[in-house]
Each structure stands twice: as structure tokens, then as C-alpha cells.
């Protein structure tokens, strides 16, 4: 018989081991000639509220699905012919316009550079194509890995469909061309949707079946998602490599030049010099296994264009690679060629330079083959010796820790400051042989990189996930003797809640209540250190602790800002040295961990690179690691999955860097502008995106934005200041443009051109 309806079941588990099923008619499905569904329909219709044994019901359903071979109906809603005849592809497909993070705000907040790579409940039920056999274990690039191409439609289904396409008149020719254009646009839209939404191949295959049958022009679509996305063109060579435990892992090299050719926009570069930043870190694949991926990432540094990182090499195993020099060999060989010869893109020759290598402390020690952060000779910048000291459970520190966890019984501290600085020459000659575990292949890069200063002290791990997380643990951990009372914690949470409503769009992850501090991400620690801390901690923690925190807050902001980093580097360095010394006085010598010690060296990175800390940190790389993790759809053949997903993206999407546009009108009605982007900042006429600082240091609340005679003008109200938020012997908040404002703005409106804006507040 023919079943015309399938019922969706909402299942609510009720003890003991029984379920209640509520039936709702939802989707019309035509021409399904399966008798068993008719039987199921009769059973379900006969009683709309039935209770049946859980195991029997699940067994019955599994038997039905197995013999009917309609697995794809689990993920696919029926797609009908649109009322507009199919001219609009979006009317044919139910497209999820959420941004992927569940908040539905339409922005890419999942790509928010917040150092979070854990927000990715990746689908591990399959590899994305419904067949685990299609991965090539031995890295054979000549096939898709399953030795059988019979399930692929390599010709994009361009077979003769019996339609006479001869040109019998100008009108018919124009009509045929229009139809072909429409079909092409639909196909491109489908490809972009599938890649951007990370649609698994098994789902896309099922969708193609329906679209080819019911979509206008659907017969022009291929039968296979791999043909549609061009997956079969991916080329990669995966070879074995041992991990630290002696187990055999996998390694593949993707290449620097290939990545640069895919992303560089030549017109965005005023000179022929390209500066590269590299990053290396371990990526845990899942919480239930010890499987790790160790990628080497590269990113082009540019102020005129937005570049995303790309993969240079990857290792997958149960731990990091055993032999770091084997891991780095391909990278060193290619970077030497690029440094010597440069590369040509679109007929233009570019010189290549290594700007810096960004990694956390354990990864830097791995790459340089030096003592780890718990070693006595661990400091990378000076010869200060660590001291092993007993610690309580609430003391001691591990860089990058995102959770308050039980600490080891002993920790290595570095209480001394005045020690001899390490140099590139002393590193290469093994002057401090106890600092080294062995030679590093990175010393063979030509021209030589500075093995001390080229490895920047990443402030995302050092300052936010390290120092800021540690001090929040001091104040709010139940096991800390410096903790504040519950009443004060409640007051801090109340203040944070008030601040949350005033956080502008640039902060895409809003800070949570202080009760969630152990789960904060790096961007939340950053927000607390730079913005919320001086306000919410005032009159809460003891004055000496508050003034001590202000030293860290003030110095870090000076080094983070592109406006102040270079001219205020000496002042910031003095403040950080004071912060280090006072930490031992307030919190004891156990606070002088490697993170705290490295603060006295972080200003050297600004001097050496000429860049602010905001330009040489791991936020963009850590965010890209999260993207890599979300590409994984199965725990098998991980490197092959990543290579294929990257290839699909490269051949179907525009991967060239986006040029920075100074002014972009986003929403307007005539000459009245309601939303615009200026110097990479988002401005509106309503809070919290309408507070600005002018170049004459006026604080203005935008009331209206409009265009007149080709100029963009802003009308707003000025706010007068009462005074600084904090003022100590060393620091004043007004130096950072942080003020306490009057209760109300000045009623008089002022008008000025948009180029008078100095910054957004």
C-alpha cells in the first residue's frame, strides 16, 4: 500500500524504562510504497497516547528502517516545489540562518577570536559521507580511499536528458540561457550553504535525491555530494609518524606556499613584503579520548586586509610527536626556500619574512627542545633559576588552565628578577646546557631567526588564561585564604549583570556571572582584566589587592593597545615589575610562578616586533583550531577529513583576504544612516553601540547619523566627566580614557564629521 503521512514523535522518558509518545502529523511524503509504514501508521493512529516497552519499540523501529532503506528521512524534511516556480533557491530549501552558535543573532560569534575551541559538539556518528571506507589510510592520493568510484557521479550528471536544446529562435535561446543561469545560481547557493553550514555528506546526498526529483532544474545537479563539492579532487599524502608514547600516529604536510597562493590578495599589499606568523599547539579531539591533533598554522600579518590562518602541517596521535625535528623537517625545508626565493602571486613577486612564532609555554618548549615550565631552567628569556616549593591545593599554577582544578603538591617558582638575559647566540651555542633537551631544527632556518625573541610570550595564555584566571581563583575559590565572602560575590555578580547590557557588539561573548568563573573563556578573562575588573572589584577586595590588580590592568592595556604600546612600553614594563614584586608580598612567594615571572619579559616582545600585544597573540589561531575541530564528523581518518573539508572550501568559496574598508554603510533610509562600520568598529544610534571618543577627547553619545554633500555627519550629545574610576600613586584611569560620567548628558547637540572619531567606547 501507499502511506501518505509520516508522524514525528516527541519522546519523553518516564521511569521505569518506559516512554510516552505524542503523535503530531507534520510532513507529507509522497509515493513511499512500503507496507510496513502503513502498519506503523495504523498502530500510531489507533491510540494517540500509548505506552509501550522501550526496548520493543526501538527494536521495531530499527527493523523498519533497516528493511525500508530510508535512513535519510531522519535528517531530511520534504522539500516541495515553491510557489514562485523555483526561481528563488532559498524558497526551495529550508536554510538555517543561525550563526552556528545557537544565539540566532546572525553574526559569526562562533568565530569570535575568543580562544575557545571547546564549543563544538562535533558529530562523531559518521565521517560525513555515510561510509567509513572512503578514507585512504595509506595516504594514496590516486583515489578516494575505498577503491570504488561507482557511487560517484563524476560527470555532474550531464547526460542527455532527452530535451531538445537546439536554438530555434532568439526568444527560446534567451529563455534557455536564463534557465541555465538560474540553475547555476541555485547550484552555487546550494554549495555555499552546504559548506558554510558544515552539512554532512550523507545528509547532502539525501537532499540531492529530493532536489533532483522535485526541484526545477534539479536534473542538472549531480547525484553525489562529493561530485557537487569537488571532494574527489583533494590531494594529500598521509604518512606514519610516532607519538611520544611510541604509538604510531599520522602526519601530513599541506604546505606554506599553497596556502599563501590561496589566501593572498596582491592588491591589498602596498609593498612586496609579506610577514608571516606561525602557531603550534595541541588540539584535543574529544573529551572521551586522548587523541590529539598537533597542527602548524600560518597567518599573514596585514593591516590593510583580513587574513585567516591556514594549515601548514598536521600530526595526529595519542600525544604530541616523539621527534620534534621529524615533525618540523618539511616546514623548515619549505620556509627556507620561501625566505630565499620568495613567491609569485598573480604575476607579482613577494618577499617572505617570519614575523614571529606564537605558542603557549608547553608548545614553545616542545618546538625549541628546551626545559618545560616546571623545570628549574625553564625561563626562556633569562637565566633565573626556579625553586621547587610545596603548595597547597589552591596555590600553584598551570598556564592556560581554564578550570579551577586540584593543583600538584609542589610547584616551581621564580622569585628572582635581576638575572642575565638569554641571547640568540647563547641559545645556539648551548651555553646553559641544562636549559636544552636537544637541538632544534628551527635553528637551521636561513636567514637565522632569533631563537629567544622570535618566540613571543603569547598574552592570551600568559595574561588572561594564566595571570587573570589565577587571581580570580585567589578571590573566588572556596579553598583560597584570600577569597571574598558570599555577600561580596553576589554584589560582583550584580555589577557584572549591569555591565552586560552596556557591552558593545565588538565583544561577541558576554561575560558571565562570577559563579561561572571556573568556566570562563579567554575572552571573558580579557574583558574582566581590561574593562570590568576596576569597576566590579572596587570596595570589594582589600585596597592593597585592588591597587595591585590595577598595576596589571593598567600595564596590560598600555601594551595591548596599538595607540600606546610602542610609546608607553617602558612605563608598562616598570609597572609589571612592580606587579611581580608586590605579588610576592601580598600572596606569598608561591605566586611567583613561570607565568608571573614571564610578565617582566613581555614588554620585550613589543620592542622586538614593533607591534602591540593585540597583534601578536593566539586568539585568531585558537579560534581556527575550533573550526578545525568542528570539521570532524567521525573519530576515524581525522587528517583526511580535515584535508577534504579544506579542499572543498578552497575550490568553492572565495578564500582570498578581505580588504579593510574604512567606512561601510550597513543600513540606511535615504540619507539617514542607522548602522555603519567605520575603521572596523560598528556604530548605531542606540546603546550600547553609540558611545564614542572624539579626537579632542569629548565623550559623545550618537543621536543621529546622516549623509550630506557626500560627507557622513554625526549628531550627538556630549557627556561631561566627574573624574577617574581609579587613581593610585602609579596609575590614573583617565590615561586610559576610563572615566566616571555625570548622571545626564549636556542637552546641547553637536555635529561633526565621522573622521573626528578617535575610538569607540
Image (cartoon, rainbow, N blue to C red):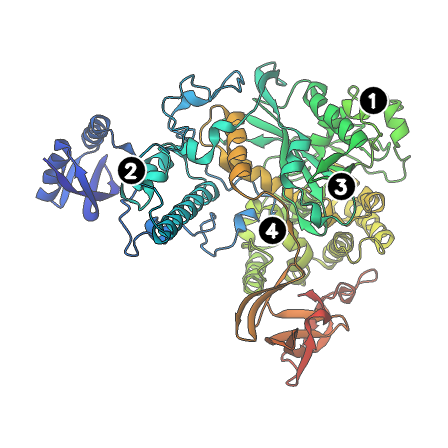
Q: Which residue is drawn at 74% across and 52% down?
A: 560
Q: Which residue lies most toward the bottom here?
A: 748
Label 3 close to label 1 by CB (< 8 Å): no
Q: Please tell me how crowded label 1 is: few (under 14), some (14-19), or many (20+) other residues with Cα within 10 Å.
A: some
Residue 74, label in figure: 2
- Using the rendered image of the protein, determine whether residue 276 is visible from the camera's viewpoint: yes
Disc 2 from disc 4: Cα separation: 38 Å
At numbered mark 2, what does the secondary structure look like: helix, strand or loop? helix
Question: Which circle's residue, 2 or 4, is located before the other in the chain?
Answer: 2
Q: Where, quadrant-wise, is the C terminus in this rendering?
A: bottom right
Specify which label sits upstream in the sequence, 3 or 1.
3
Q: On the image, which quarter does residue 277 sit in?
A: top right
Quickly name the residue at label 1: 434
Return the mark for residue 274. 3
Q: State left or right for residue 39 relative to residue 397.
A: left
Could you give the CA–CA distance between mark 2 and mark 1, rounded to whole angstroms?
60 Å
Whichever of labels 4 and 1 marks the residue nearer the N terminus, that label is 1
**Of the pair 251 and 288, the residue shown nearer to us:** 251
Q: Which of pointers 3 and 2 lies earlier in the amino acid sequence?
A: 2
Instruction: Give how far apart the Cα atoms at labels 3 and 2 are.
Output: 49 Å
Q: Is residue 393 visible?
A: no
Left or right of 599 in this view: 121: left
Q: Do residues under tags 4 and 1 come within 8 Å of each other at their CB atoms?
A: no
Between the C-alphas of marks 3 and 1, the distance is 36 Å
Q: Which residue is drawn at 54% across and 54% down?
A: 512
Which mark is first along the chain, 4 or 3? 3
For image coordinates 18% across by 42% down, the residue present is 30
Residue 260 horizontal/vertical position (percent): 67, 37
CA–CA distance in space, label 3 to label 4:
32 Å
CA separation in Å, label 4 and label 1: 38 Å
| Residue tagged 4 | 524
> Along the line of sight, which residue is nearer the eye, 413 or 500?
500
Amino acid at each position: 500500500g501507499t502511506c501518505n503521512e509520516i508522524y514525528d514523535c516527541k519522546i519523553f522518558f518516564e521511569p521505569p524504562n518506559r516512554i510516552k509518545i505524542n503523535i503530531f502529523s507534520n510532513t507529507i511524503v509522497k509515493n513511499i510504497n512500503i507496507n510496513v509504514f502503513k502498519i506503523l501508521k495504523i498502530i500510531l493512529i489507533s491510540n494517540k497516547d500509548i505506552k509501550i516497552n522501550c526496548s520493543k519499540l526501538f527494536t521495531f523501529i530499527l527493523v523498519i528502517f533497516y528493511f525500508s532503506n530510508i535512513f535519510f528521512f531522519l535528517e531530511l524534511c520534504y522539500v516541495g516545489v515553491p510557489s514562485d516556480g523555483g526561481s528563488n533557491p532559498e524558497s526551495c530549501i529550508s536554510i538555517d540562518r543561525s550563526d552556528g552558535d545557537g544565539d540566532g543573532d546572525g553574526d559569526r560569534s562562533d568565530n569570535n577570536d575568543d580562544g575557545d575551541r571547546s564549543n563544538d559538539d562535533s558529530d562523531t556518528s559518521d565521517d560525513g559521507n555515510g561510509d567509513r571506507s572512503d578514507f585512504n589510510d595509506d595516504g594514496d592520493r590516486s583515489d578516494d580511499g575505498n577503491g570504488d568510484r561507482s557511487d560517484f557521479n563524476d560527470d555532474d550528471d550531464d547526460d542527455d536528458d532527452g530535451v531538445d536544446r537546439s536554438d530555434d529562435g532568439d526568444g527560446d535561446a534567451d529563455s534557455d540561457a536564463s534557465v541555465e543561469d538560474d540553475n547555476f545560481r541555485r547550484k552555487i547557493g546550494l554549495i555555499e550553504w552546504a559548506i558554510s553550514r558544515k552539512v554532512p555528506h550523507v545528509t547532502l546526498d539525501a537532499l540531492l535525491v529530493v532536489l533532483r526529483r522535485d526541484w526545477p532544474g534539479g536534473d542538472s545537479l549531480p547525484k553525489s555530494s562529493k561530485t557537487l563539492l569537488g571532494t574527489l579532487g583533494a590531494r594529500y599524502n598521509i604518512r606514519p609518524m610516532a607519538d611520544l608514547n611510541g604509538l604510531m600516529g599520522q602526519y601530513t604536510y599541506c604546505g606554506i606556499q599553497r596556502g599563501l597562493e590561496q589566501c593572498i590578495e596582491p592588491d591589498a599589499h602596498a609593498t612586496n613584503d609579506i610577514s608571516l606568523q606561525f602557531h603550534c599547539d595541541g588540539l584535543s579531539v574529544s573529551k572521551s579520548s586522548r587523541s590529539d591533533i598537533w597542527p602548524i598554522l600560518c597567518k599573514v600579518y596585514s593591516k590593510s586586509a583580513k587574513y585567516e590562518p591556514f594549515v601548514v602541517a598536521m600530526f595526529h596521535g595519542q600525544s604530541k610527536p616523539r621527534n620534534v625535528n621529524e615533525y618540523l623537517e618539511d616546514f623548515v625545508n619549505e620556509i627556507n626556500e620561501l625566505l630565499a626565493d620568495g613567491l609569485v602571486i598573480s604575476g607579482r613577486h613577494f618577499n617572505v619574512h617570519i614575523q614571529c612564532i606564537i605558542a603557549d609555554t608547553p608548545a614553545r618548549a616542545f618546538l625549541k627542545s628546551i626545559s618545560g615550565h616546571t623545570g628549574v631552567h625553564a625561563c626562556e628569556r633569562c637565566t633565573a633559576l626556579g625553586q621547587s616549593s610545596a603548595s597547597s591545593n589552591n596555590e600553584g599554577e598551570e598556564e592556560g588552565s581554564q578550570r579551577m582544578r586540584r593543583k600538584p603538591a609542589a610547584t616551581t617558582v621564580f622569585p628572582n628578577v635581576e638575572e642575565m638575559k638569554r641571547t640568540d647566540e647563547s641559545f645556539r651555542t648551548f651555553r646553559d646546557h641544562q636549559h636544552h633537551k636537544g637541538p632544534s631544527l628551527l635553528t637551521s632556518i636561513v636567514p637565522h631567526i632569533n631563537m629567544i625573541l622570535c618566540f613571543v610570550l603569547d598574552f592570551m595564555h600568559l595574561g588572561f588564561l594564566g595571570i587573570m584566571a589565577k587571581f580570580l581563583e585567589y578571590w573566588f575559590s572556596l579553598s583560597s585564604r584570600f577569597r571574598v565572602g558570599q555577600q561580596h560575590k553576589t554584589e560582583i555578580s550584580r555589577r557584572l549583570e549591569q555591565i552586560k547590557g552596556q557591552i558593545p557588539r565588538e565583544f561577541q561573548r558576554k561575560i558571565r556571572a562570577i559563579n561561572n568563573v571556573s568556566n570562563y573563556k579567554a575572552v571573558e578573562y580579557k574583558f574582566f582584566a581590561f574593562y570590568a575588573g576596576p569597576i566590579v572589584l572596587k570596595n570589594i577586595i582589600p585596597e592593597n589587592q585592588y591597587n595591585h590588580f590595577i598595576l596589571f590592568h593598567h600595564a596590560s592595556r598600555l601594551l595591548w593597545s596599538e595607540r600606546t604600546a610602542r610609546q608607553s612600553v617602558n612605563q608598562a614594563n616598570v609597572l609589571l615589575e612592580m606587579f611581580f614584586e608586590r605579588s610576592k608580598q601580598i600572596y606569598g612567594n608561591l605566586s611567583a610562578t613561570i607565568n608571573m615571572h614571564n610578565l617582566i619579559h613581555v614588554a620585550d616582545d613589543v620592542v622586538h616586533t614593533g607591534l602591540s600585544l593585540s597583534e601578536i597573540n593566539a586568539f585568531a589561531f585558537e579560534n581556527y583550531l575550533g573550526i578545525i575541530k568542528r570539521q570532524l564528523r567521525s573519530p576515524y581518518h581525522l587528517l583526511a577529513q580535515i584535508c577534504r573539508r579544506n579542499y572543498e572550501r578552497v575550490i568553492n568559496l572565495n578564500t582570498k583576504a578581505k580588504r579593510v574598508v574604512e567606512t561601510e554603510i550597513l543600513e540606511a533610509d535615504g540619507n539617514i544612516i542607522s548602522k555603519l562600520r567605520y575603521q572596523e568598529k560598528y556604530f548605531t544610534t542606540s546603546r550600547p553601540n553609540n558611545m564614542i571618543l572624539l579626537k579632542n577627547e569629548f565623550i559623545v553619545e550618537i543621536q543621529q547619523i546622516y549623509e550630506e554633500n557626500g560627507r557622513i555627519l554625526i549628531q550627538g550629545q556630549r557627556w561631561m566627566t566627574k573624574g577617574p574610576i581609579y587613581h593610585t600613586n602609579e596609575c590614573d584611569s583617565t590615561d586610559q580614557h576610563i572615566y566616571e560620567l555625570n548622571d545626564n548628558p549636556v542637552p546641547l547637540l553637536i555635529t561633526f564629521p565621522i573622521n573626528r572619531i578617535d575610538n569607540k567606547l
